[in-house]
Image (cartoon, rainbow, N blue to C red):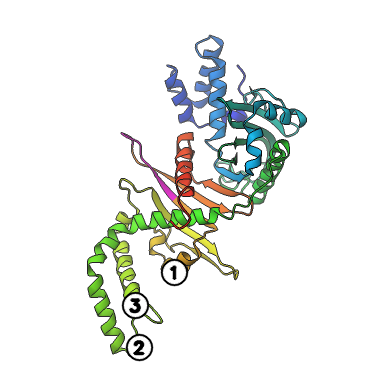
Amino acid sequence: MQVVSDVMSNINLERIRMFNRRHGLRVSGTKNELVNLIKESVVSGIINQTEVEEFLAEEIAHGKNRILFVSSFPDSAVANLQNVEAIRDALRMKGLRTVNFNNLHTISCPENLELAYLKIHEEQLVNKISLCFSKTVIIKGAIDEEGEELPPRNETEYVWVDILPTDKKIHIKMRQRSGNVWVNNSRIKELYDEISTIVRETFSLAPKSMEGVKNILYKMFKDLTETAEQPFTAAVAPLEEKITTFAEEVAGEVGLHSPYDPVDLPHRLKRLLERALIQQDFHIYEGYFEGKRGIVNRIYFSDATGASVNARSSEVEEGIAVADIYFDTKESIEKLQKFDKIWITWFYKRTGQPLEKIETKFEVAKEHFVIHFLYAYTTKEMQNHVFSNFKHFEELPPDR
């Protein structure tokens, strides 16, 4: 069985070990040794080649493909996308293959953009259409172990597409290369635009505004911050009457006509005490407990006047909860109820397994939004965990 190195470079050693373990193969050795063992097992009939091909596709679809573009399409397109014959007709009209296939393990640096994978998932109706496009990209700016810049080289870029008729969503995933390699976001956006245009033209999918996602990001922010702050608001709540009395007395002594106008002093003082408690016990704020989905690390929003706020702490290890700008703009946030960007750490806790943290960034554009999976190799299960959290907030009523 042939497996090109381009595919294997997108899969880490631990995932290969997991595959081998699942099939009773040796798990010790280098990456190349374990890959060769898989190939030999296919030739000898120990493993079915289709299983290996699907494993490679699963890892290409997730793993290092850590930047996800999500867009939508109108209800009117759903019927055709749930009909397998209509899908095949659309692919045929575009000159693309019409039956399920997987050439990911054989394609390396194609001369032109090439469809390398197609799977139409159907039960009674089609529930997902998965495609993977491969394209040759020039890698510049790579640094070797001695700090010297390497000459430009060609690599195969994989762009994974999932069309979800029921959700009326298109997911387009690609690799966010690390370090100094291909960090230009405009290059990533150009590739997204190219693939998105092909998909939309093939299946006649008109774009929709994603402005409403900004409110979903606010709902995430509201729920996650309220949950994280709950131990501290609960500690201050019994003292609310004392705080109000104190604020009224001091306001009178300094000559204010009202403790509530032009500033609501009791409320501000209450929030200041909560903030002091958070700073004192920040490990509690950022820690996990059952029912806590995650924590907000950073926010960005702009209003109708064009003014914008980019709120984060000055210290890398501290979160949004101790940033001055967050407290100064909280009332504006609650009035606007929209975010352009938000950075969230999601908690991923499985029974009997240690807690994992999934670092993400969400940002909204006119006709799509982007989820960045930051810093780590992400499995299908981890990405699905983030999607399920997003769907939870998407389905909450607007006034939540």
Q: Name the residue: 69% across, 45% down.
A: 206
Residue 139 lies, with reference to residue 262, above or below; the image says: above
Residue receiving disc 3: 265
Q: CA distance from mark 3 to mark 1?
A: 14 Å
Front residue (pair 199, 4) = 199
Q: Quadrant of the C terminus?
A: bottom left
Q: Which mark is residue 257?
A: 2
Q: Residues within 10 Å of mark 2 (few under 14, many from 20)?
A: few
Residue 377 x %, y %: 49, 38
Quadrant position of residue 201: top right
CB under 8 Å between discs 3 and 1: no
Q: Amino acid at mark 3?
A: Leu
Q: Residues within 10 Å of mark 3 (few under 14, many from 20)?
A: many
Q: Is residue 209 magenta?
A: no
- Write down the region rendered in magenta: 345-353
Residue 231 x %, y %: 28, 58
Q: Secondary structure at mark 2?
A: loop
Q: Secondary structure at mark 1?
A: helix
Residue 355 x %, y %: 35, 41
Front residue (pair 372, 392) = 392
Pick whichever of labels 3 and 2 is earlier in the sequence.
2
Residue 283 x %, y %: 31, 55
Residue receiving disc 1: 331
**Along the horizontal axis of the image, is 44 left or right of 115?**
left
Pick whichever of labels 2 and 1 is earlier in the sequence.
2
Q: Name the residue: 44% across, 26% down.
A: 18
- Figure disc tally: 3
Q: Quadrant of the N terminus?
A: top right
Q: Amino acid at mark 1?
A: Glu
Q: Secondary structure at mark 3?
A: helix
Q: Amino acid at mark 2?
A: His
Residue 211 lies, with reference to residue 155, above or below; the image says: below
